């Protein structure tokens, strides 16, 4: 498993931010599109409904690709409901994780492998 230094992890943030932006844009597009679908669905015939459903499947595939691109860097999401990413880290020779949320410009939190409760706030 690749362990990132703080500098390496911060250098990766623009790439990850771009993927997050694409994912959020897709989410907004999906929300608008799905709202439209709900309005017209009662009036659609089977073929028309199938076309709308294909678009849903295509958007799901797009989202999976953006998520896969994020995870391909060896990072993982904090949980299923969070945008916070964890990076396997090495800081001062000690293994741990860096935590980063897409709204932050740089990584500011490190948690050592032994530290389970209180993470260390980094000064960048």
Image: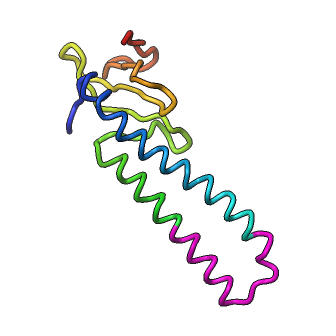
Left or right, residue 78 beside residue 51: left
Instruction: Write the residue at 52% across / 45% down.
Output: 80
**Residue drawn at (42%, 12%) of the image:** 121
Residue 114 falls in image quadrant: top left
Closer to us: 21 or 59? 21
In this rendered view, identify the residue nearer to me: 64 or 112: 64
Q: Position of residue 66 (x, y in %)?
A: 42, 53
Q: Residue at x 55, y 48 (%)?
A: 24
Please say if 69 is above or below 1.
below
Q: Which image quadrant is residue 109 in?
A: top left
The magenta span reads 38-58
Where's residue 83, x and y in %?
A: 50, 38
The answer to whether 103 is drawn above or below residue 92 in the figure is: below
Residue for point 23% across, 24% down: 5
Q: Is residue 94 above or below residue 16?
A: above
Quadrant housing residue 81 = top right
Q: Nearer the viewer, residue 10 or 100?
A: 10
Residue 101 magenta: no
Measured as percent of width and height from the top left, residue 25 is found at 55, 51
Q: Residue furthest top?
A: 123
Dividing the image into 4 quarters, which one contains the N terminus?
top left
Quarter of the image that includes the C terminus: top left
Left or right, 65 with reference to 56: left
Q: Is residue 106 left or right of residue 90?
A: right
Q: How many marks?
A: 0
Colour convention of the picture: rainbow
Q: Residue 108 location in percent, x, y?
A: 41, 18
- 47 inside magenta stretch: yes
Most common secondary structure along the magenta stretch: helix
């Amino acid at each position: 498993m690749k362990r990132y230094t703080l500098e390496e992890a911060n250098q990766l943030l623009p790439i990850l931010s771009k993927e997050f932006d694409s994912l959020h844009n897709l989410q907004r597009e999906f929300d608008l599109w799905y709202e439209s679908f709900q309005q017209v669905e009662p009036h659609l015939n089977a073929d028309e409904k199938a076309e709308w459903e294909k678009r849903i499947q295509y958007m799901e595939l797009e989202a999976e690709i953006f998520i896969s691109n994020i995870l391909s860097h060896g990072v993982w999401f904090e949980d299923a409901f969070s945008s916070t990413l964890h990076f396997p880290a090495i800081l001062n020779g000690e293994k741990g994780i860096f935590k980063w949320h897409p709204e932050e410009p740089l990584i500011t939190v490190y948690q050592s492998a032994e530290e389970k409760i209180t993470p260390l706030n980094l000064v960048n």
